Amino acid sequence: MRILGLLAAMLLSACATMSDSAPPTSGTKWVTSWGASVQGPYPIGNPSAMPDMSRVFPVPANGARDQSFRLIVRPTLWGRETRIRMTNALGTRLVTFEGVHVGLQNSGAEITAGTNRAITFGGKSSVTIAPGQSVWSDAVTLPFVRDAASNELAGRKLAVSFHVAGESGPMTWHAKSLQSSYVTWPGAGAKGNEESEASFPFATAAWFFVDALDMRAGDDAYAVVAFGDSITDGTASTINGDDRWPDVLDRRLRAAYGNQVAVVSAGIGGNQVVGPAVYPPPKPFPGGPSALSRLERDVLSLSGVKAVIWLEGTNDFSRNGNATFEAVANGMREGVARMRKALPGVRVIGATVVSALGSTSAAHGFKEQDDKRRQLNEFIRTSGVFDGVADFDKVVTDTQTGAMRA
């Protein structure tokens, strides 16, 4: 974990002009505390540890039918007020959500008694979202957050529950949550107000229809977005273990700053910087929309973002991507320029790409890919495009073999 210690130190240094080490004293602005970059439609993607969902969603094209979801999410910064973003970004039909609630998870699908709170949208208990659109909820108070500046809720999780009225059609989702969430039988109706786990017999290792959660925080709080592919998304990490590298970085920053810095994972397994060229719902790609095409939704539209760590490129150079070094480098130049224009003062840290030599995947590990990877890493280190470099490659690569260290 040496790279994460260095990265935490870099972020603390880079953001020193933005805040000091004092905890936030009042909730004055929104900061994104959790996120899930969306793709779709279900079941297109690269999930991990996904149970058989054939009884839950018998016809994927029809999506959910009169069903309730209970998504378990872990805020990385706590406040006394929260709001969520519901999304139909990659759907093809109008979707109506109702009976939306948020409460403190007790265990599994059970909610801690007395913590479940109804969420509204423009004062209404339901919201209908058009294809391609997303909607933020109204603010809701979390009375169980007694002292946002303390660490008493660090590591605890929220249960976000909602009902899909009627049939959703193709579902916008995040395939690789590596977190157990829960779903009712089709036709079960609205169950989000229930604290019991009884109505939610099915587990899923994906998130559906919710892609961001904000907390009300002090002026000195901010979010760090980890933007990338499967390495950031957590492939091969532990389900329900919260041990992706962004999770570990979050714990490092919390130890240094307390409840002041949120770390938001915006990784998608199989993602590319510049590919695919198009991503319409009828023509999906398992790695999701390209980093450049999802940048607005997954970074720029989030709240309180002050730093971005971009770790990506290996899939562009795979046999599935086959992009040139120049295309990816130019894509990174464009992405960083767009971030700086939209988020004045943002710190953008380039992360070097680790070796895939020796990979068991047929799409990775060949010499041409590694040659391009080395070129891209030299660009990240020396071009001056980035405000800093997190040199993952230097830490994990065996200099004798060129492959990852044992």
Image (spheres, rainbow, N blue to C red):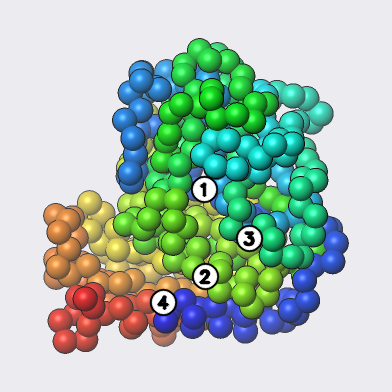
Q: Residues within 10 Å of mark 1 (few under 14, many from 20)?
A: many
Depth check, mark 1 against mark 3: the one in front is: 3
Helix or strand or loop: what does disc 1 sit on?
Answer: loop
Q: Which residue is mark 4?
A: 1
Instruction: Please tell me whether residue 17 is drawn above or below residue 62 in the rendered image.
Output: below
Mark pair 1, 4: CA separation: 24 Å
Residue at figure coordinates x 31%, y 57% from the top left: 236
Residue at figure coordinates x 44%, y 51% from the top left: 240
Q: Which residue is mark 1?
A: 36
Helix or strand or loop: what does disc 2 sit on?
Answer: helix
Q: Which residue is mark 2?
A: 249
One can see residue 135 in this view: yes
* Amino acid identity at mark 1: Ala
Q: Residues within 10 Å of mark 3 (few under 14, many from 20)?
A: some
Between discs 4 and 2, the one toward the N terminus: 4
Q: Nearer the viewer, residue 19 or 372?
A: 19
Depth check, mark 1 against mark 2: the one in front is: 2
Residue at figure coordinates x 21%, y 71% from the top left: 370
* Amino acid identity at mark 2: Leu
Picture disc at residue 209: none
Depth check, mark 3 against mark 4: the one in front is: 3
Picture disc at residue 154: 3
Q: Quadrant of residue 228?
A: bottom left
Q: Quadrant of residue 116?
A: top right
* Amino acid identity at mark 3: Ala
The x and y percentages for residue 246 are 49, 64
